[in-house]
Amino acid sequence: MDQRPDDRADNRTQIRDFLASRRAKITPEQVGLPTSGRRRVPGLRREEVAVLAGVSTEWYTRLEKGHISGVSEDVVEAVAQALQLDEDERTYLFDLARAARPARRTPSRRKDVAVPPRIQWLLDSMTMSSAFVRNGRQDVIAHNALARALHAPVFDSDTTDKHGRPNIARYIFLDAGAQDFFIDWEAAAVATAGLLRAEAGREPHDKALRELIGELSTLSPEFRSHWAAHDVRIRHDGIKRLWHPEVGELELVYQSLDLPMTNRAVHDLTLYTAEPGTTSEDRLKLLASLAATQPHAAQPTEGPR
């Protein structure tokens, strides 16, 4: 069975807007093309991308309008190279191309799955690192005691109370306190919108994800702006600066790792730790000691919806 008409239209829109946004970011000088006269639009023209990709202008124009079904992987790869896509953007474009192909049967929605007890045991064994598991929608579905203490503003947010589990995206865009907790709030907002954009490419039939994106788009002008940029983020690591209400400023190293589950689900294991010998390490140790004295909170569960 083929895709529903509204799914196909949404897929074409995503392809069109993504390719146009990437084309607008590249100047002729960057790709060694001559420039002459005034240019009506920023970045490359469609015919210039076509030349770089080795396809006709008509072919590329049709592709940028979202008609990617049936296009070979070689052509998609050539377009990715012409637009100088990074690895995350390239993966996203191939996900969009895959979703555009006619399906033999109705595509199944990825099922949410429970976090196995062994994963919770793993999290609990980490006493000096904040560790939590989240799904592609940015729901926190398992965590250790230090993650609960470190991210107390997220767990205690009204956005969590309303939905039953913390959601990083809702907190960042819908809780005013997020701009105090995340010292580099703008960078966190860009990354979070990019992570949701990548997930939308991987899981185009996820109704809950669509509802989340619709909610954020309706309630947050900042999210609408970041979503319209079509930036993509898959790999997630770096330095995070937080302002914690109990211990003050923390500068932490964070790393996210894929955590494959059953039923095609791939969750994300995120670790926060401090550089040894720093003030942030001392403050993280203080949070760990405080967390050890608190009653163990019930873990959120992940199950079918």
Image (cartoon, rainbow, N blue to C red):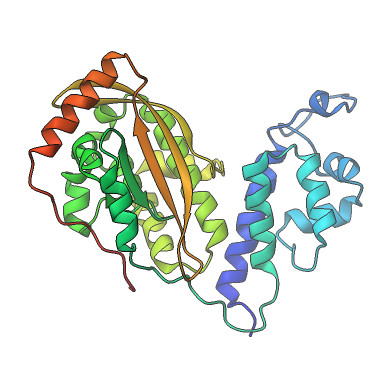
Judge left or right: residue 112 versus residue 234. Answer: left
Total marks drawn? 0
Quadrant of the rendered image containing residue 233: top right
Classify 103 as above or below 59.
Answer: below
Q: In which quadrant is the C terminus drawn? A: bottom left
Quadrant of the rendered image containing residue 66: bottom right
Classify 204 as above or below 138.
Answer: below
> Whole-percent x and y of residue 281?
28, 21
Quadrant of the rendered image containing residue 130: top left
Judge left or right: residue 75 versus residue 125. Answer: right
Towards the viewer: 54 or 72: 72
Identify which residue is drawn at 36% across, 29% down. 185
Classify 290 as above or below 113.
Answer: above
Identify which residue is drawn at 39% across, 68% down. 112
Towards the viewer: 281 or 77: 281
User: Could you tell me if residue 234 is visible in this image?
Assistant: yes
> Whole-percent x and y of residue 241?
34, 24
Towards the viewer: 7 or 121: 121
Towards the viewer: 44 or 205: 205
Judge left or right: residue 290 versus residue 102. Answer: left
Identify which residue is drawn at 42% across, 61% down. 209
